[in-house]
Amino acid sequence: MGNIGAIWGMVGLSMILIRGLFSVLPPALALQDYSFTAIHWVGLVISLIFMGYSEGYKGFQLKFSPRVAARALYLRANPTPARVIFAPLFCMGFFHATRKRKIIAYAVTTMVVLLIVGVRQLPQPWRGIVDVGVLFGLGWGLISVWIYSAKAFFSKTEYTISPETPDV
């Protein structure tokens, strides 16, 4: 049951991130219909740098992805029916996590939803410019989740990242 939960956690989380990628793809692709001015090009470069660094590198690669892999490993060794059924949410830290981890998980999710609502109000080409940066950061994040998961499950050395559960 633990292996099924760990696999479901990683597959389910990947599906959530892939859905996010596909939802920002149309506005990003719509940029082909616009003639960019210098300010648009500057905005695009800033969006790529900012989202790559803050979302892809700092958010996913340094924090979220290593912990997700650690929580999937924890789930494999400590399965319960609720953890297995809701494995993607467990891996993201929404339950059976330290108080701090749960607060961060819910706060970041709320912030992302509010940002999505706000960005959808932007006119093109600005929405597409922001969404190109989101594509970059989210794609980086998805790849980093897969890399850390591979390290956690297939490395010959012990994976030492804390799953941030109440009992660890």
Image (spheres, grey):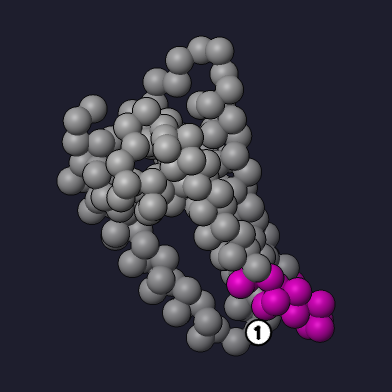
Residue in the foreground of this view, choosing between 119 and 17 = 17
Quarter of the picture holding the N terminus: top left
Residue in the foreground of this view, choosing between 15 and 127 = 15
The span shown in magenta is: 23-40
Picture layout, residue 46 above or below residue 101: below
> Residue 17 occupies which quadrant of the picture?
bottom right
- Residue that appears at 61% across and 59% down: 18
Query: Could you say where residue 90 lies in the image, as x and y percent from the top left?
Result: 35, 48
- Residue, disc 1: 124
Query: Could you say where residue 13 lies in the image, as x and y percent from the top left?
Result: 50, 52
Instruction: Say which amino acid is labelled 1.
Output: Gln
- Residue that appears at 81% across and 77% down: 32
- Residue that appears at 23% across and 27% down: 168
Side of 95 where 88 appears, left or right: right
Taking the image as drawn, is residue 129 in sight? Answer: no
Asked if the magenta segment contains residue 34, the reply would be yes
Residue count near mark 1 (Cα–Cα under 10 Å), binned few <14, some 14–19, many ≥20:
some
Taking the image as drawn, is residue 24 in sight? Answer: yes
